[in-house]
Image: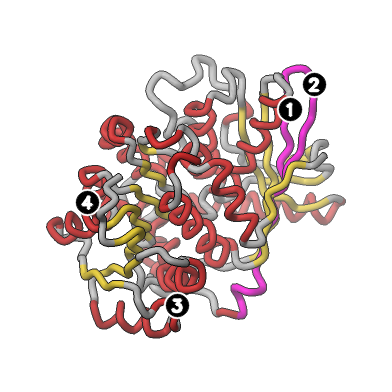
Amino acid sequence: MNGSRKFDVVLYGATGFVGRQTVAHFAQHAGGLRWALAGRNRDKLEAVRAASGPGAADAGIIVADAADTGALEALAASARVVLSTAGPFALYGSALVAACVAHRSHYVDITGETPWVRDLIHRHHEQAARDGTRIVPCCGFDSVPSDLGAWLLAERFRSLDEPCVQVKAAFSLRGGFNGGTLASALNMLDKGQTRMMADPWLLNPPGERPAAPAAQDEDPFSPHRDADFNAWLGPFFMGPVNTRVVRRSAALLDYGPQFHYQEYLRFGNGVLAALTAAGVSVGMSASQGALRLSPVRALARRLAPAPGEGPSEAQMDRGSFRCELVGHGARGTIARATVASRGDPGNRATTQMVCEAALALAGDASGLPGGRKRGGVLTPASALGETLVQRLRAQGMTLALQP
């Protein structure tokens, strides 16, 4: 990595809903790092910097439109790490990632757009791997809790010298959506990417797809009562994103040839929980089917928050998430882990995750998984591993193995 770069981290999309929160986080936690805000409108960037207090006073300003290749090249050349919150990433992110790869600048974002990530792998993985450039999408609530939780359990079984054959995750959460997240989801549907999104191994490396697909890797569509959690579980709307990321980590980090991962939404115990799980499952299936129709998507856009809008500060403060994970070993050992945090998961927690991922990349690369030479289109676990776990714990997030 070129030590003469002007900035350690550049925050791209800094005037968006999550982007403004990343600026506030860096204003409090960047320490002595050199950092800058980037986006297409100088006046808005300066207003965000001023609103973020004295900790942001020395932050730089970079004007770069997503359609201006030259400006993006200059941005990437000036930064050791680029953090992007500018979605939909399939519309606004491809040229920026290409510039980061060309200039050997590490990159993180908060996308959950798996077809776009698959395209990044196809276009850039080999070059980034050769150069030791870490391109790390999905560093928000998509998909850090799932990926680091599964990694913690895989490492526990590795320490026991027992192959990990299955991990299941059950989520409980309270929070809201911002306009950018909804815009990204609708854009994937506009592009007719439903079939790609349904591929359980979409993000796996070439040749790392199972010859005989297992039922436990298919996306669930109905509720069931699970003995490991002593609760009713149903489909989780983020499962088709998170599971693909975890499976890529499993392939890159060699969790074992028989490893399976699945995740669910947790509803609790008893008759009411069973009825709720059934109702939510039916509702999810119906809404997903309806959103494949362009008139329904148009209506959703009119009713949803616009990009740049999201929950209020009070609403985000009331949010939370909890992810409980159960791992099974080949010899019958069972291990458990928890990943949890207060604050709206798609906004507050996402901001912490992606900012700490960028700060981890801006630190000493020799302490990251694989050392200084590892590169490629990676996952949070394969790119950042224990370093990100420790940084998130320091921010008050729970990432724990049960004794």
**Quick check: marks 4 and 3 in contact, CB under 8 Å?**
no
Which residue occupies 42% across, 84% down? 51
Q: What is the distance, in whole Å, between disc 1 and disc 4 at their CAs? A: 42 Å
Please say if 166 is above or below 269.
above
> For mark 4, what is the residue?
95
Please say if 206 is above or below 25.
above
What is the crowding at mark 1: few (fewer than 14 residues within 10 Å), some, or many (at least 20)? many
**Residue 217 placement (x, y as % from top left):** 58, 30
| Magenta region, residue range | 314-338
- Secondary structure at badge 4 equals helix
> For mark 3, what is the residue?
55
| Left or right: 270 in relation to 176 | right
| Left or right: 365 in relation to 328 | left
**Residue 241 placement (x, y as % from top left):** 50, 44
**Residue 249 placement (x, y as % from top left):** 51, 33
> For mark 1, what is the residue?
328
